[in-house]
Image: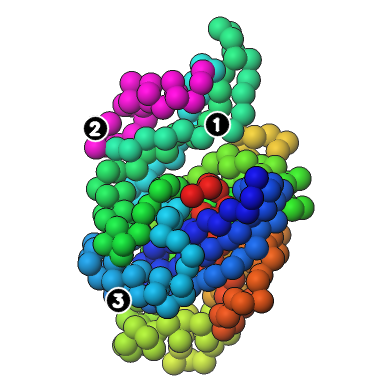
Amino acid sequence: MGKTRVIGLDIGTTHVRAAELEFGSGGTSATARPRLLKLGVAPLPPGAVREGEVVERQTVGSVIKRLWAEQKFSHKNVVLGIGNQRVVVRDLDLPAMPMAQVRSSLPFQVADLIPVAVDDAILDYLPVGSRQGDSGEVMQGLLVAATKDTVTANTAAVEIAGLRPVVVDLGAFALSRAIARGGALDHTIAVVDIGARVTTVAVVAQGVPRMVRMLPSGGQDVTEAVAAALQIPLDQGEMAKRAIGVGHAVPPEQERAAEQIVTVVSALVEAVRNTIVYYSSTHPGAGVEHLMLTGGASQLPGLGQYLSTATRLPVSGGQPLDNVDVDRAVSYPRLSEEQHTMAIALGLAMGSVA
């Protein structure tokens, strides 16, 4: 088998990110160490993507097209990520059967598990284990149900850019692949990716995703709260947010903004904590051991300590570049410092041969 190049494309609320990885003869296995050949990031106009879903297809398509022209990616086949409140992930046990049969049977199995009509959803299934049931072997897995509108909107923007979305993958699974490699394969970790409007929590045990939750809150919510408290524009609110942080002493004129940060962040941290507690209670003796933070909003000063105190677990920043070799031709300012924002794009490229 020769070398394979795969491009992951992550359409976020504020930026588009794309990563091209090259794999050797080992393919895209969990132990393979790919080479990062190209990396591109482009900002999106406000409102073009809302809560993880493309609403201005032409605008987003134009941004992606320019990114491809600037970075000169080697081909136009992409693995596209999705992940917002309109994507549901549920535990689902099924009788052991071939995957083709599993997928064909899903519409008849899941009507009571998802909040939308089966005809309006795109369904998939990820096996994560097996057990012996009363009537034979049982597959344990995660059901993924995405509304067709969400998938269609995002793939349409990619096609407008002249690209081919050959695989649509869940962003949480991409996070699992990007972060739970190397030494993390021996442990149970939770990857907490804090985006602008959506926070994704993926619990990964020995490299296998076991639970996924999408929480409807992110860094933009904190920015807006700060801007409102200080009566300043959003761009200044973003800078003020990073200067104030969470849990730090501030001068009197910033106290109201600091209070607003704590209000928004504490609700998010509590939701993350509840997710971790629920997983640990349903997996006695095999709970989460460590939290890894990724995403553009994960760098808020004091957030890691706040989350560690709430969960009573160690928290550290996700370092997806630890799991790849970076080609010397890759030129991106602050690549190491901003790698936490690249985890989904890298993980998408790690998941499938395009």
The residue singled out by tag 1 in the image is: 127
Seen at 46% across and 33% down, the residue is: 125
Q: Amino acid at mark 3?
A: Pro
The segment highlighted magenta reads 97-120
User: In this rendering, is residue 130 above or below 329?
Assistant: above
Confirm whether the magenta stretch covers residue 188.
no
Query: Which tag, 1 or 2, sits closer to the chain's start?
Result: 2
Give 180 or 36, whichever is nearer the viewer. 36
The residue singled out by tag 2 in the image is: 119
The residue singled out by tag 3 in the image is: 45
Quarter of the image for residue 337 reads bottom right
Q: Amino acid at mark 2?
A: Asp
User: In this rendering, is residue 96 above or below 218?
Assistant: above
How far apart, in angstroms, are the residues tagged by discs 3 and 2? 33 Å
Mark 1 secondary-structure assignment? strand
How far apart, in angstroms, are the residues tagged by discs 1 and 2? 23 Å
- Whether residues under marks 1 and 2 lie with C-beta atoms below 8 angstroms apart, the answer is no
- Within 10 angstroms of label 3, few (less than 14), some, or many (20 or more) residues? some
- Within 10 angstroms of label 2, few (less than 14), some, or many (20 or more) residues? few
Q: Is residue 221 visible?
A: no
- Whether residues under marks 3 and 1 lie with C-beta atoms below 8 angstroms apart, the answer is no
Quarter of the image for residue 210 reads top right
Q: Is residue 30 left or right of residue 345?
A: right
Q: Name the image quarter holding the N terminus.
A: top right
